[in-house]
Amino acid sequence: MPEGDTVWLAAQRMHAALAGATLLQSDFRVPQHATVDLSGREVLEVVPRGKHLLTRVEGGVTLHTHFRMDGAWHLYAPDERWRGGPDHQVRVVLRTPTRVAVGYRLPVVELLATADEATVVGHLGPDVLDDDFDTSEALRRLHADPSREVGLALLDQRNLAGLGNLYRIEALFLQGVTPWTPVADVDLDRLVARSVRLIRANMHRWEQSTTGSLRPGQDHWVFERGGKPCRRCGQRILRADQGEPPRARVTYWCPRCQTGPAPVPDRPPRR
C-alpha cells in the first residue's frame, strides 16, 4: 500500500493538471457510478487526506479514491497512448481540454457530497503531512491504548494518518525498539517526531529514502532487507508478520540494534 507521501505527491500532480479546468468527459467504469456524467463541471481541487484522495468538483460533488495496494492515477496528454495497464484495469477517466486522468486498479471509487466527506475520512487521525499536523492529538490517540504493540499503533490511521509500513519500520529501527514493544514502553514524543521527519523528507519526490542515500539498495535501514546485514552492527536483519491475517504486515528489525519483544522470525530467503 502506498505511503502517505506517495498519495500526497499524486494529489499535487492531479491538482496541477486538473484544478480550474472543465471536464469534457467523465467515465466511471464501476457499476455503482456507471451512469454518472460530470461533464461540464469544473474541477475545483484535488486534496490528500492520509492515504485518501478527494477530487472536488463543481456542484458540491467529491470523488473519493484510495490506492490500497495496486491503485494509481496516471496523467496523459489528450492524444497520448495510455500505458498504465490493460483497458480492463481502468476504473475512472476524467478528461479536460488539456489533460486526461486515468485511474487504474482503484479498489475504492466513491462519489459523495463534498459536505459529507467526513463519512469517509472523518475517522482519520492527524495527517502527518499537514502543515498544521496536530502532534498533541496524535500522541493522545496513541497513548489511549498503552498495551498495544507500537508497530500496529503506528499503522492505525485513526491515530495518525499517512504513515505506512515503510516509515513505521524505519522509524522504529532508528528509535531502537522492536515493533512488538508496548506503546507504554516507548518514548512516543521522539518516535512520532522521527516518523514525521522521515516521511516529510520524501514528500516532494517519488523515491523514498530513510538513510539519506537515493542509490538502489542503500535507501533503507532495515525495510525489505530480511537476511541482509544491519548497516549499523552487521547482525542479520530479521522479518516476521505483525498483526492478524489478512491484514498482517511484513515487518523487519535488527535483533541487536532494537530492544524489546519479538516473535520467532521467518526463515531467511534462500540465496
Image (tube, rainbow, N blue to C red):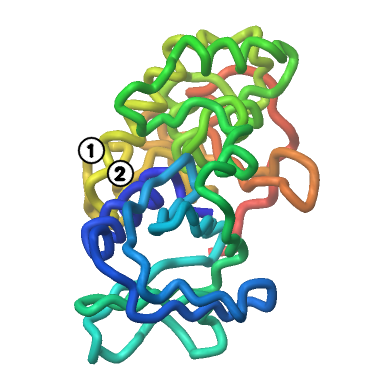
In the rendered view, would you say 216 is above or below 184? below
Residue at (53%, 42%) from the top-left corner?
A: 115
From the top left corner, tell me how far across and down residue 119 is, in percent: 64, 41
In the rendered view, would you say 250 is above or below 212? below
Residue at (51%, 34%) from the top-left corner?
A: 161
Residue placed under numbered mark 1 in the picture: 212
From the top left corner, tell me how far across and down residue 218 is, in percent: 29, 48
Q: Residues within 10 Å of mark 1 (few under 14, many from 20)?
A: few
Residue placed under numbered mark 2 in the picture: 209
Where is residue 22, by image quadrant?
bottom left
State left or right for residue 165 relative to residue 43: right
From the top left corner, tell me how far across and down residue 142 is, in percent: 61, 17
Cα–Cα gap, marks 2 and 1: 6 Å
From the top left corner, tell me how far across and down residue 180 is, in percent: 67, 25
Q: Secondary structure at mark 2?
A: loop
Residue 83 marker: none
| Of residues 269 and 246, the one drawn nearer to the viewer in this rendering | 246
The quadrant of the rendering that contains the N terminus is bottom right
| Of residues 173 and 16, the one drawn nearer to the viewer in this rendering | 16
Q: Tell me whether circle 2 and circle 1 mark residues in contact (CB < 8 Å).
A: yes
| Of residues 248 and 158, the one drawn nearer to the viewer in this rendering | 158
Q: Secondary structure at mark 1?
A: loop
Residue at (65%, 46%) from the top-left corner?
A: 249
The total of numbered circles placed on residues is 2
